[in-house]
């Protein structure tokens, strides 16, 4: 897995939560392929409302019958590694939107999860 700080590229894949790849949720397939490719990180975010190419509004409101809510799969790594990964979502996503945005990683914790973060005003030993 890549640990990075500084300039990076964010890949976002917008799909529906009911989209599948070989009977598996499409968002899960994308995350597992990103993991297998050794990318720095990937997360899935479930939307509460949205619409896409179909122009149908999907919502999580109680009285709505829609269950195909929007999902965003976000992958962040160096530009080179994200661009090398692009053929994966291209091959998987039949209907959806894929975007790329330059970003900057300012903090990536190193696995020392138990240590308190120091900040302004913290006093040393």
Image: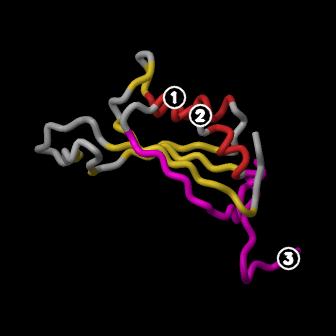
**68 vs 99: above or below:** above
Could you say where residue 65 lies in the image, as x and y percent from the top left? Answer: 14, 37
How far, Cα to Cα, is label 3 from label 2? 49 Å
Q: Which residue bears the numbered disc 1?
A: 91
Q: Are marks 3 and 2 in contact (CB under 8 Å)?
A: no
Q: What residue do we see at 47% from left, 46% from top?
A: 98
Residue 101 quadrant = bottom right
Mark in the foreground, 3 or 1: 1
How far, Cα to Cα, is label 1 from label 2? 6 Å
Q: Secondary structure at mark 2?
A: helix
Q: Which residues are magenta?
A: 96-125
Main SS of residues in magenta = loop
Nearer-N-terminus badge (3/2): 2
Residue 20 quadrant = top left
Q: Nearer the viewer, residue 18 or 7?
A: 7
**72 vs 120: above or below:** above
**22 vs 79: above or below:** above
- Left/right of residue 37 with respect to residue 12 in the rendered view: right
Q: Residues within 10 Å of mark 1 (few under 14, many from 20)?
A: few
Nearer-N-terminus badge (3/1): 1
Q: Which residue bears the numbered disc 3?
A: 124
Q: Are marks 1 and 2 in contact (CB under 8 Å)?
A: yes
- Left/right of residue 56 with respect to residue 2 in the rendered view: left
Q: Quadrant of the C terminus?
A: bottom right
């Amino acid at each position: 897995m890549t640990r990075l700080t500084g300039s990076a590229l964010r890949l976002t894949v917008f799909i529906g939560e009911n989209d599948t790849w070989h009977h598996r949720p499409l968002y899960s397939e994308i995350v597992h392929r990103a993991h297998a490719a050794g990318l720095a990180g990937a997360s899935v975010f479930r939307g509460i409302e949205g619409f896409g190419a179909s122009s149908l509004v999907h919502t999580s409101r109680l009285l709505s019958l829609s269950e195909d809510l929007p999902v965003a799969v976000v992958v962040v790594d160096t530009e080179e590694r994200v661009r090398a990964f692009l053929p994966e979502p291209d091959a998987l996503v039949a209907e959806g939107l894929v975007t790329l945005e330059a970003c900057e990683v300012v903090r990536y914790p190193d696995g020392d999860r138990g240590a308190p973060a120091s900040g302004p005003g913290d006093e040393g030993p």
